[in-house]
Amino acid sequence: MTSRYRLLQPLATGGMAELFLGVAKGAEGFERTVAIKRVLPHLAREPDISRMFVSEARLAMLLQHQNIVTVHDVGESAEGLFLVMELVDGWDLGALIRAVTRQGLRVPPHLAVFIASQAQAGLQHAYRRQHDGQPVVTAHRDVSPSNLLVSREGEVKVTDFGIARLAGLSRTEPGAFKGKVPYAAPEVLRGEPATALSDQFSLGTILAELLAGQHPFGSAAAEPMAVAYSILNRAPASLPDVPASLATLVLRMLSRDPAARFPEPEDVSEALARWLAQTGEPASSHALATFLRGVRLPMSVGEVARTALAEAPASTSASFVMSVAPHEGMDTGRIPSASGARPGTMAYGGGAAASPAWKAPPASVPVAAEEEEPWSPPAGGVSLSASGAVVHTCALCGSALESPDSPCEACTRGPRRRTQAPTPAPVDAPALATQSISDVDDAARMNRPSIRQAAQGDLELEERAPRVESSPSEFEPAAPSRPRRRWGPAVALLGIAAVLAAGALFVWPQYETQVMRALGLPSAVLSIRSEPSGATVLVDGVEVGVTPLVMDNAYPARSVPVQLKLKGYRVWTGSFMGGKKSDVQAELKR
């Protein structure tokens, strides 16, 4: 049996997968909005990536709890493996934290504890769950605001178990750090295995941030190395405006020594429940939903979905069929269905109603994803439209081409002169950063129709930033004549600036060395990154991994050649100095 899904529009792109707003189609025209997570095309046939994705699917479908995002289905299309997930009508917790902070508000303590207790309930279910007599999860490993979702109805859900340890079914390389540094436990930063105790530290960090309105170890947006140093060496910030009993509870969760924290997940849940019982305040989904209505938040993903359904007819959105043939590395026999049925089937819920016109996209996408980045097609080459179709674009102007060899009609007609940039759609709430669709430019991009809906002549204006063609004299007034100045003070200021810069250059390496020592890392580290990521790395002719890659620079003290290879892109060639800290960054060309 096969199931058909319809892609409405892209939501975000991460290092390994892309996320789409989609529709699951049932009998008699029944439809349900879902989130569809799909492996990036250039990684879809990589065996290691496929195994990792299937492990995530297997793990997610074993977890069925009201505080965990539900995975309905897993399958394979012509574009690669995909997951069909519950679409939470709300926001990630990071969006809520930033919104209340910018508006000078504060999450009430009883609601902050309620959010933490609900998240802990979801994690606790994952810890208890067993499959074939083995525990399914030993740690989530990425408990962070972007992976805790809050719905408009006040529900709290944990998402993205993609890097969790799946006991007995998958393995994570020892000493490899996965997660977000500002919310990582000290022992995890030192390379020790993640456990439920390290998840407890991460949840305590989030709870402290909810209560105080700021990260307990500095700014979460600060340099990751600086935050890691604070987590490893400094005590968390005090919570003066928080009830003493609650502050004591949070600081215990944030103990640097894992043995000083609550010994079991059940102990955390009980401590949070006892504190809520003592307050007498209503801590419920209804109370949280009431609070959310008083905060100016961006559009929820549910609103975006309803608008997309109302504005995009079925004929304009591509659909793809899930294949029942197993993919290489895909153990379909061991993947239980979300509803108890065989793999490849799913139960459908109700459709979504229409909503008013779309004002602005959400500042965050509360669905399971990796480090999220706004989706945008590249200039030139091949890209995917919002409907999932392959679109060839001109490398000069970005206009759509009928085929790779077709001449560009826009370039033939000559450039169009633009004297005024189009006004972006208004944003109802402050733009929110961190792995989500955040600024006004992204809002305008998400507010546009799909590439297949746009006329060929409109693509340049719709998909590329306007280039104002004007002479400098139109904007720059003629420089007035100025009297001659003495150069002595300027030279003195330049000298002082040079001394300060030299001091900074001298101090920063020392500070960085301290951080590296605190992390237990060697001082000579080789970092190799590429845009896009996922490129195979060959150092001195030997394959060592894929980008992004961090490894010891134990190579001889000489110029060491490095190559990056990615299907569909030219081979990138460079070098670095062996035995020294090196950072290689490459932009791959088609």
Image (cartoon, helix red, strand yellow):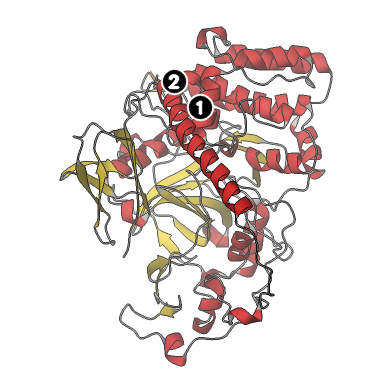
**Within-10-Å neighbours for mark 2: few <14, some 14–19, many 20+:** some
Q: Position of residue 334 (x, y in %)?
A: 34, 34
Quick one: quadrant of the C terminus? bottom left
Q: Confirm whether residue 346 shows in the render.
A: no
The answer to which of 285 and 466 lies nearer the viewer is: 466
Number of labelled discs? 2
Please give the name of the residue rendered at 64% of the width and 25% of the height, measured from the top-left corner: 216
| 86 relative to 571, above or below | above
| 307 relative to 158, above or below | below
Q: Amino acid at mark 1?
A: Ala
Secondary element type, mark 2: helix
Residue ID for mark 1: 228
| Left or right of 268 in this view: 15 | left
Please give the name of the residue rendered at 37% of the width and 42% of the height, measured from the top-left corner: 53
The answer to which of 109 and 230 lies nearer the viewer is: 230
The answer to which of 94 and 421 lies nearer the viewer is: 421
The answer to which of 248 and 89 lies nearer the viewer is: 248
Secondary element type, mark 1: helix
Whether tag 2 and tag 1 are in contact, CB under 8 A, the answer is yes
| Left or right of 530 in this view: 312 | right
**Within-10-Å neighbours for mark 1: few <14, some 14–19, many 20+:** many
Q: Position of residue 44 (x, y in %)?
A: 32, 52
Q: Position of residue 519 (x, y in %)?
A: 42, 23
Q: Position of residue 500 (x, y in %)?
A: 54, 39
Q: Amino acid at mark 2?
A: Ala
Residue ID for mark 2: 518
Quadrant for residue 543, please give it. Answer: top left
Please give the name of the residue rendered at 32% of the width and 55% of the height, measured from the top-left corner: 42
